[in-house]
Amino acid sequence: MRHKLIQFMVLFFVAVAMMQSHALKSAPTQKNRDIEQKLKKIMVLYLGTNYEKRKMVESEVTYYINVSGFEAQQSFKHIEETDLPDTETIVNILEKNGFDGILVIEVVDVELKKERVNAHMTYGRGPGAPYLYDYFSVYRRYSEGYERIETTFELETSLFRLEDKSLIYSNTSKAYNKGDIDLALEGFAKGTAKKLKSSKTLLKTK
């Protein structure tokens, strides 16, 4: 009797061990779950009234996201209207074109700062008559003062997952335009791509 009980217990524990082993193999690991949660293809949408500016912002941000190894496309390639459609229509476009997320960029604040650059005199040396002691002669250049306007844009960037319509990433950053809008936009786009990479919300495809 005791022998049969021991035999039963051995068979029981072996069976339980086999079931647990099978369950561990079939159950998704945390790593697999994390990969499944990451977005594979996102649309970049800039909320603005100026269509040309929208194209410019979306193109720059999309470029640096793709360079980082992720897949992103500009919204204007799928939504050409100057006035954006309602949310339901945008969701239908996303689903139809295989997107699983959307990155929305919006200017939430603009700050203008005027700065006066005073007149000044510049001294230096330039080519002159060939003197015995110096080939260069001294020159003076007068620059009149002018007013410089520095614009600071505060932009909010939000990443939504299409599957459950949830917000999975949000960030607010500032872009400084000191007379060169292209340089300001490039800095914002690079920063956005870098922060998205750090957030680990996107799946590398390249």
Image: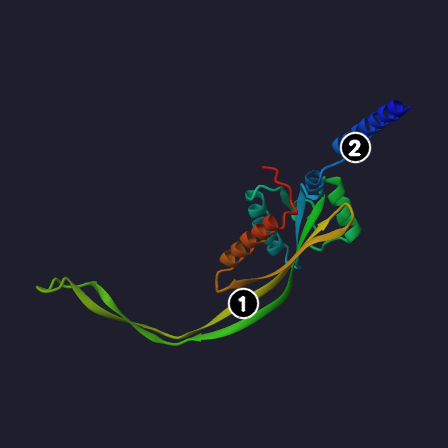
Q: From the viewer's side, name the closer residue of 24 and 167.
A: 24
* Residue at the spot 20% in from the left edge and 69% down from the top edge: 138
* Residue at the spot 63% in from the left edge and 50% down from the top edge: 199
For residue 200, above or below residue 49: above
- Figure quadrant of residue 6: top right
Residue 194 at x, y = what percent?
56, 51
Q: From the viewer's side, name the closer residue of 34 and 72.
A: 34
For residue 16, above or below residue 174: above
Residue 64 appearing in the image: yes
In terms of secondary structure, where does tag 2 sit? helix
Residue position marked by numbered label 1 in the rendering: 151
- Figure quadrant of residue 82: bottom right
Residue 79 appearing in the image: no
Q: Which mark is residue 73?
A: none
Nearest to N terminus: mark 1 or mark 2? 2
Q: How is the image coloured?
A: rainbow
Q: Which mark is residue 20?
A: 2
- Figure quadrant of residue 98: top right
The outermost residue toward the front is: 2
- Where's the C terminus, which quadrant? top right
Residue type marked 1: Thr
In terms of secondary structure, where does tag 1 sit? strand
Q: From the viewer's side, name the closer residue of 67 and 21.
A: 21
Numbered-mark total: 2
Classify mark 2: residues with Cα within 10 Å, few (<14), some (14-19) or many (20+).
Answer: few
Q: Is residue 120 left or right of residue 166?
A: left
Q: Is residue 12 left or right of residue 42?
A: right
For residue 114, above or below residue 104: below
For residue 111, above or below residue 101: below
Residue type marked 2: Gln
Cα gap from disc 1 to disc 2, whole angstroms = 62 Å
Q: Nearer the viewer, mark 1 or mark 2?
A: 2
